[in-house]
Amino acid sequence: MALFFFLFLLTLSSASSLNDLNSLTYIVHVDHEAKPSIFPTHRHWYTSSLASLTSTPSIIHTYDTVFHGFSARLTAQDATHLLNHPHVISVIPEQVRHVHTTRSPEFLGLRSTDKAGLLEESDFGSDLVIGVIDTGIWPERPSFDDRGLGPVPAKWKGQCAPSQDFPATACNRKLVGARFFCGGYEATNGKLNETTEFRSPRDSDGHGTHTASISAGRYVFPASILGYARGVASGMAPKARIAADVISLSVGGVVVPYHLDAIAIGAFGAIDRGVFVSASAGNGGPGALTVTNVAPWMTTVGAGTIDRDFPANVKLGNGKTVPGVSVYGGPDLEPGRMYPLVYGGSLLGGDGYSSSLCIEGSLDASLVKGKIVLCDRGINSRATKGEIVRRNEGSGMIIANGVFDGEGLVADCHVLPATSVGASRGDEIRRYISESKQPTATIAFKGTRLGIRPAPVVASFSARGPNPESPEILKPDVIAPGLNILAAWPDRIGPSGVPFDNRRTEFNILSGTSMACPHVSGLAALLKAAHPDWSPAAIRSALMTTAYTVDNRDEPMLDESTGNTSSVMDYGSGHVHPTKAMDPGLVYDITSYDYINFLCNSNYTGANIVTITRRKADCDGARRAGHVGNLNYPSFSVVFQQYGESKMSTHFIRTVTNVGDFDSVYEVKIRPPRGTNVTVAPEKLSFRRVGQKLSFVVRVKTTEVTLSPGATSVESGYIVWSDGKRNVTSPLVVTLQQPL
């Protein structure tokens, strides 16, 4: 597992509050400076403190990097007892964290043959280390070869954790560190099942290998999956080391206050030391308020499409063709033959609901044999549905999206001839089946198609705003390629992921914001290499203010789930543009103390803030100086509660740093949200030197609109600073809420 110093966050048992009656796993954050001198180590001190508890728990892990403390399995009574200890800062119940390429580098404008640009300027990220927190890594894959790389960067202080199936030689000048932690998981669930899991950093799932190679995989040719997506595979930063100047976090969970979110706490410790943290936004889209990993010190990444597709169309017996997608590798259906077509939900002998979803035990082989089966998406995985149809001797399968999934399609590596169709197309096929006496169909697999228009499109599964915890901070920040991405894949795992898939491939195609996140991690590594003095906030600012919101037709980006125009709640600042991000002109920088002031103005208590930041806060001073919207963020968001006032207003204070040319002048352009009046003062910023900082104030005025109780109105616009060749663009979102 490429740098697994946070793996305990992914594997510990879920807990909702300190009031749970059963024994659960908690992280205990302590004031390390209070350790009595009689104890030789912090661990001795922690053990002594636990001895007085009724359950006499044992320590699972101790922590001394991001913060000081330990994890242990505790009863609610013991957790409360510890929380009252004078030297305990917080007791945090653990959560289970869930894991949420040959074309995407070219789609992003990263070409290895260019004599200038981000790859060349950064030496392909050779001196940067990317820490991937995920399910592990398969080190033997060519994507992690160290041919031609120089020595491991001297600043790297991590380690490689050898084990029976992961020798020390598995690490090299590319994979510079690999660790795993399973103590928390085993404390809750018992011993690992070592017939399916490795007690080592080796990947038994595939997700971690895939994401690691997206962020920093070497150039590999030829690369493909069962004949699809042929080409040269590479990560965003092909020479970057994997192991932590940049942390890539393709996992998430429910949104909770930051002082109860171990990922947010760990991420703050990282950025406080100059480490960029990117995190996946989650796959809960297209619904609103689904975005996760929303702390403002993390860069939150949603998913978009690229200009590549894998068409696998359904031809119905009535002559109509229904478009679908698949990366099924054969053998194909018999050419020219039409197969009987049935809908799982209409088969006799089942309960209708289970058979419509093609769940285990729901299908009758006598009714499925030799036929193409239409299955509804949901409950079990798409590939598992195909395995169930195959075991019941079905000849093929069509997966139809539900209403919530909309028209967004994900290509899967199925174990039988199969394709996926959108919700409206699924309805069309069901009508044909119900109206035809002998419905028939076949599936035509068309291979790989490039130059798809429109692209990018916001992926239907990509989680959306507004930010559930801090609505004044627009999330996601950006989107990046996340649909049907080709990357490295481990041995011993079939490309479909189902247990009975015995096919083996070096690469696989997956979709999710988990795939989008490492694209941004790799780009951040390149930007850090090109600009070593940039902070994590400056890197994020460069990615956000240079992002774009139009597709390759030069029209507004669409939402895959509906086919309609997407919005800032879908894509944040827009789709990343690596070449422009290298030279953004201005950046919105943020210090750790700025984040502390943000937490003060968000009404976090002093104890909460110490839990997150390990610093005491002067919240009285912070509140006198501003409000929560004054965090120096590259986007602007305000929420007005309509309490009967006809006119409402607010202001934002921002400071930008010149990272472009000396003696440069930027003038402001405003596109106000509908129904608002927006002014910026001053309207011109004149910089005499690089590194100079100048401030401006944005004032927003709006009027009350008619809304039903609990309803919301969202309007967006932009503020752009331009010097004639660079446009520094920030979205401005105004939300009106009618109280219940």
Image (spheres, rainbow, N blue to C red):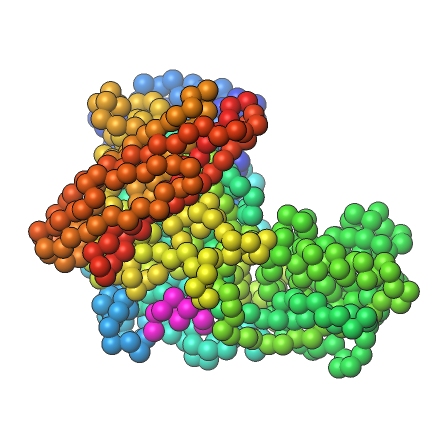
Judge by depth and name the residue closer to the eye, 113 or 268.
113
Q: Is residue 28 left or right of residue 327?
A: left
The magenta-colored residue range is 102-111
Q: Which is nearer the eye, 583 or 96?
A: 583
**What count of labels does the image hold?**
0
Would residue 342 be found to the left or right of residue 685 on screen? right
Residue 414, relative to residue 114: is it above or below? above
| Residue drawn at point x = 11 percent, y = 56 percent | 662
**Majority SS type along the magenta span:** loop
Q: Is residue 175 above or below residue 66?
A: below
687 versus 653 height, above or below: below
Q: Whole-percent x and y of residue 445?
A: 66, 75
Q: Looking at this view, is 418 or 6 the one in front?
A: 418
Q: Is residue 567 magenta?
A: no
Q: Where does residue 588 sit, x and y in percent of width and height?
A: 25, 46
Q: Quadrant of the N terminus?
A: bottom left
Q: Is residue 109 magenta?
A: yes
Answer with left or right where residue 703 lies relative to residue 398: left
Outermost residue toward the bottom in this view:
335
Residue at point 29% right, 34% down? 699
Quarter of the rendering occupied by the C terminus: top right
Residue in view at x 31 percent, y 46 percent:
670
Location of residue 60 (image quadrant): top left
Asked whether residue 349 appears in the rendered view, the answer is yes
Q: Is residue 266 visible?
A: no
From the top left corner, tell me how far across and down residue 188 is, in percent.
Answer: 54, 37
Q: Residue at x 60, y 60 (%)?
A: 409
Q: Position of residue 688 (x, y in %)?
A: 8, 51
